[in-house]
Image (cartoon, rainbow, N blue to C red):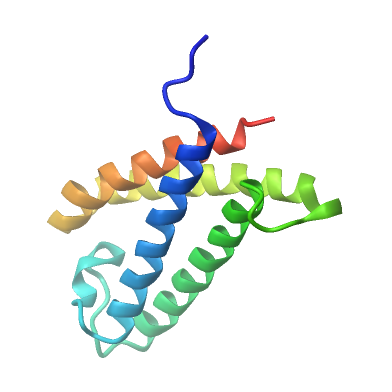
Amino acid sequence: MKKLIGVNLAGKILLFFMILLAIFHVLILLKVLPSEIVWGGQMRESSTNMVTLEIIALFITLIFTLIIAAKRGYIRVGKFEKLINVGMWIIFAYFILNTIGNLTSAVFIEKLIFSPITLLMSFFAFILATEK
């Protein structure tokens, strides 16, 4: 069966999206973008929770980026190859759950823009997770 998209392209696109996501979280932290467009609109810029959640989100984004880069061979992992494979399945599950969260969000931007993006990221993560 012919693949819809190759592993190399899926990995590059996913890494590109991850870099954009990291920049997005930094812009939220720097208050360049309003915090009301994330976390279902529940966080306000003055909220301590917003800063904490955005730092956690940025950290997770960076960890996921490292896992994806390792899966594509940009980072040598040696004995940790199985851990990277498990990590890819975790990333896939995370993006599926994130897509569901975005679809149920009261925030228009999350529902209309972020939902399709996280669905695409789920698709690319699935391609990488199923790669031998």
Location of residue 25 in the rendering, given as x and y in whole percent from the top left corner: 35, 73
Location of residue 16 in the rendering, given as x and y in whole percent from the top left corner: 40, 55
Residue 26, quarter of the rendered image: bottom left
Depth order, front residue of 94/47: 94
Location of residue 67 in the rendering, given as x and y in whole percent from the top left corner: 62, 55
Left or right: residue 69 versus residue 46 is right
Residue 28, quarter of the rendered image: bottom left
Q: Quadrant of the C terminus?
A: top right
Q: Residue at x 68, y 58 (%)?
A: 75
Q: Residue at x 27, y 66 (%)?
A: 38
Residue 41, quarter of the rendered image: bottom left
Position above or below: 47 against 122: below
Left or right: residue 24 versus residue 88 is left
Position above or below: 89 against 132: below
Position above or below: 59 against 5: below
Depth order, front residue of 56/22: 22
